[in-house]
Amino acid sequence: MRSLTAEQFKILERLEIEVPSWAYGNTGTRFKVFPQPGVPRNPYEKISDAAQVNLYTGLANKVALHIPWDKVDDYQDLKKFAEDKGVQLGTINSNTFQDEDYKFGGLTHSDPRVRQKAIDHHLECIEIMNKTGSRDLKIWLADGTNYPGQDDMRSRQDRLTDSLSLIYKELSKEQRLVLEYKIFEPAFYHTDVPDWGTSYVQTLQLGDQAVVCLDTGHHAPSTNIEFIVMQLLRLGKLGSFDFNSRFYADDDLIVGAADPFQLFRIMFEVIRGGGLDGDSEVAFMLDQGHNVEEKIPAQIRSVLNVQEMTARALLVDSDALREAQLEGDVMAANDIFMDAYQVDVRETLAEWRASRGFSADPMNDYKNSGYASFIAAERIGGEQAGWGA
Ligand code: PSV
Ligand code: MN
């Protein structure tokens, strides 16, 4: 069995995956949300669940929050609570998609009052970041239109630039603005930040502390996502990933479930582009919703999938690959690439995790821990958290 070298394990050890607080709440489709027993009722309980993922895998030491879903009275207290559970508060995600005022947009709205409201929301997020110690403000905008002619796309783009620059200048030197793009939904005709190019242009105008978030579910079918990863890393603008997988649109399924080979190809480009180097600032996040499966095991499976595909990508013999590429040996180059993808690293990783004091078999150890029945019995009454505000 092929194993990783000590140096490769060192790189793998740098892989840290941030889990989203909203993955532990109830989610569903516009048709139905199926509630599950034991679902958290507040941000504290979400963090407790997230800490379980880290406990067994040692891979997920940060929890991303979504505002206003995760608003609390005392962020210092929430921070301390998280740290006591062995995790940190991570990225703050803004939300300008669930308020009546934002029907025709937020940061791009033609009405200065609504635009200011959306800007103020982001300034509030920065204030929260100052308390939680978060580095990243992640902005995804639902802004767009449903019908040709509905609004002037160019003016909206100009207003977006203005709004973002007002937010950007409130960041401290250590903080970043991370702009996420998405091809469509909820807007069906045009979206104001639909692709990496728009996100790149907008963040380039803002400055070095503005970078792009690549959500793997936010592209047209057949898009070569690893090409975008390569390009953004090359340009120094890849800020973060929102990992998930999809069969059709923004399905938010377990990362690596739909297309493990794509995950391998992405992680190969991450490594190739320095995204796992010691000084890399790329954040690896999950952005998923577990509608029918149990949430904590689904998150454990997700982080393990990323770890597995990263390990396989590390196994690509890059010297041999370069040689084959330079010789124009198509078959050899492809063989070298595929050879690493085909290696089953599960046992190697199980042993490695155990050697570092984590679980060899996180899925089973979590299952046998009794935590699921504990929270189901404990969390009676109150309102279960959901994706909605
Ligand atoms: C939008 O679809 C998105 O990917 C953004 O990251 C949001 O903040 C998130 O989903 C909410 O799940
Ligand atoms: Mn996302």
Image: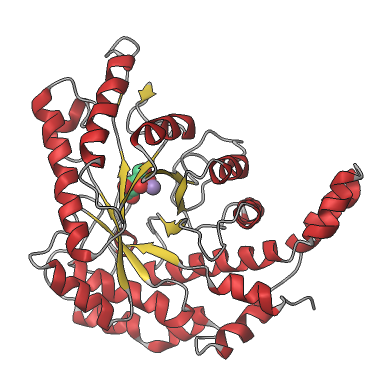
Q: Quadrant of residue 298?
A: bottom left
The location of residue 347, given as percent across then percent down, is: 67, 81
Q: Residue furthest front?
A: 173
Q: Is residue 202 visible?
A: yes
- Looking at the image, is 191 positioned above or below residue 12? above
Q: Is residue 68 visible?
A: no
The location of residue 329, given as percent across then percent down, is: 91, 45
Identify which residue, 3 or 374, lies in the foreground: 3
Q: Quadrant of residue 44?
A: bottom left
Query: Dividing the image into 4 quarters, which one contains the N terminus?
Result: bottom right
The location of residue 97, given as percent across then percent down, is: 23, 39
Query: Measuring 90% from the left and 51% from the top, which residue is drawn there?
Result: 332
Identify which residue, 106 or 116, lies in the foreground: 116
- Looking at the image, is 112 positioned above or below residue 367? above
**Left or right of 80 in this view: 55:** right
The location of residue 279, given as percent across then percent down, is: 50, 62
- Looking at the image, is 194 positioned above or below residue 365? above
- Looking at the image, is 172 positioned above or below residue 359? above
Query: Measuring 61% from the left and 84% from the top, which residue is drawn there?
Result: 352
Query: Measuring 36% from the left and 87% from the top, which residue is drawn there?
Result: 370
